[in-house]
Image (tube, rainbow, N blue to C red):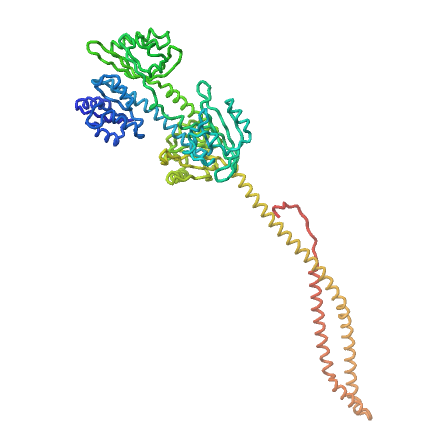
Amino acid sequence: MSISIVCADDEIEYRSIVAGILEREGYSYKAAPDGNAAWELIQTERPDVIILDWSMPGKTGIDIARLIRRDAGLANRYVILLTGMMETYQKVHALEAGADDYITKPFDTGDLVARIRVGMRARNALKLLSDEIQVMNRALDQSPIGILVTNAEGTIQYMNGKSEAITGNRISETIGKELSAVRSAVKVLDEDGMYGAIATGTEWEGKSKQILSNGKAIWLHTMISPLRDDQGAVSHWLVVDEDITNQTLTEEALKKSESLFRSIWDTSLIGLRLTDSDGRVLRVNDAYCNIVGKTKAETEGHLFSEVYVPEGREEIQRKHKERFAARSVPPYFERKMTLWNGKTIWVESSNSFVELGGDGALLLSVFRDITVRKRAADELANERELLLTLIDNLPARIYVKDTEMRFLLNNMPHVRALGETSRHAVVGKTDFDYRPGELATKMSDDDRRVIGSGEPLLDKEEQLVSSSGQAIWVLTSKVPFRDQAGNVKGLVGIGRDITEQKILEESLKQRNIELETLLANLKQMQGTLVRSEKMASLGALTAGIAHEINNPLAYVSSNMNRLQEYFADATALVREWQTFGKSLEAAAGCSDALVQLDESAARIDLEFILQDFDTMMKSVRDGIQRIKRIVDGLRGFAHISESKFFDAKISEV
């Protein structure tokens, strides 16, 4: 990684010296001839390392150091002060103003390079931890669970956004207040148990009811847990609230306050010690005494090695004399010290020789107790492992992406779902590295919408392909996470496997279709049976009608035949009579009778009757035949065939 450096010195020869050193080391370097130009250049370039001369035209190096520490964007820059001043109080003044280190002119080339390298190592290590913690803390602040952290006395030091949403108490109005005052509207069902747990420093879990400012009542599932320091004493209380008014309990998540992760650089004490070539302490300040646990009277005039445990003093004294004589005392180091009283601390120390001309030299050592910082670094690492353990054991796939849709953080269920075995193998990759092109494009489009709009995407059902090639269904939610300025820096995704649920839904749909089909068939069968019953009833009716018609019709038909025969006999008789009458016309005394008979025959139109009778009989016969056909039709309609029974599946009928 390229390191950018800005150097400000009003002496051109020193600027040239520094430029030559930095160019040989391959650093990106820019120079300024005075303080004002240096400050403008620093604001524009935002360099990693800033080297400042103490005395310059315009702003001094001290002025610029103060400005840098006031600028949040420059707060973690490594500042080295170049000075020709030899007085201790002046060097202390520079460090207190915001300088991280100083070099006395004239200086050694290796000394400058070593201090730059040490400074960058420290800065990079802190930045790496800080970046990881920022991601985790933003995920913590966007947690669906309300979190409060108080000190041991009950004063609220941290409150996340969900706690504000649940309780209605504003964060800005809550921090610094007593927990009992803020939660006065909360009615705890097991109050005695809660206070008993707090008194004994143990965990408590229970249910409570809170009346919000708008009069609405909500129910909370609350967990109160003690947080202990290295000595086992309760240092903080963690209060976790889950709104269970409209939902069941969610996974418990213990999170720490962001305030616990803040850097302690600006609040570290500076200890000063001046020793001679024999290692005898000539002068110390109160901060040094506080660090080593001795008074000035117990330190000044004594060998500096007396602050260590007795077992190592002789070796420490011998190395000091050798390095003092060779002027090879390390200019900067971090070291773990075991003090005379058995206490172990970490110190950060920088050393420089103060030449006294003909009177020899003295060694000025500047100490900072970084035990808290070291402990904080360990706690941060432990906290990171705790958070990873938590999300690894949640029944969901959780991941964090940056604005380029690259994976930053993944829990192990998501890692395994992608076919990997290590979370580090996924970092920096995208969905295109694991998904088919079309699916990866859809997922990437969703990510862009969430990041671009700042609006969450909730409960989207997606069909994916697992690492084993099986089709699965996942219920996905994506929410943006933001930096302290409110800018969207990426998103947090949570996916839950709902494949079994989808399979069950499809099975239910298919069963519904089958039941609907069966119901329709049953209705059709019912209609058929009703029609059959109606037809059977109608058939019985028509059979009765046919029977009633057929009986008199048989009489009519039988009598018609006999009538036909009678009429034929009568007609034959008339014809014979007519023939006989003609033969009697000449007989005496018969003519008048015959005339009278003829007149009677004419009057009744006997010939027409004889002819029309046949026509009428034929029409009657035709009518009888038509009635017979109708009766036969009614008999056929009334005929009911035998039912046939067979086995069948009712769903196939």
- List x then y, in percent, for residue 294: 36, 12
Question: Which residue is pictured at 62% across the width and 48% down the height?
Answer: 653
Quadrant (top left/top right/bottom left/bottom right) for the N terminus: top left
Residue 55 position within the rendered picture, expressed as x and y whole percent measured from the top left: 21, 23
Q: Where is 305 relative to 28, above or below?
A: above
Question: Looking at the image, is 484 positioned above or below residue 287?
Answer: below
Q: Residue at x 76, y 68 (%)?
A: 552
Q: Position of residue 529 (x, y in %)?
A: 66, 53
Look at the image and tell me whether residue 526 can be seen.
yes
Name the outermost residue toward the bottom. Answer: 588
| Tally of numbered tags | 0
Near-viewer residue (171 or 407): 171
**Residue 9 rendering spot, x and y as whole percentages:** 20, 24
- Between 466 and 73, which is closer to the camera in this rendering? 73
Q: Foreground residue, 208 or 213?
A: 213
Residue extending farthest to the right is 589
Question: From this viewpoint, is residue 438 visible?
Answer: no
Q: Quadrant of residue 152?
A: top left
Q: In the drawing, does residue 501 fall left or right of residue 304?
A: right
Rendered image quadrant of residue 255: top left
Horizontal arrangement in the rendering, residue 489 relative to residue 91 (left or right): right
Which picture quadrant has residue 429?
top left
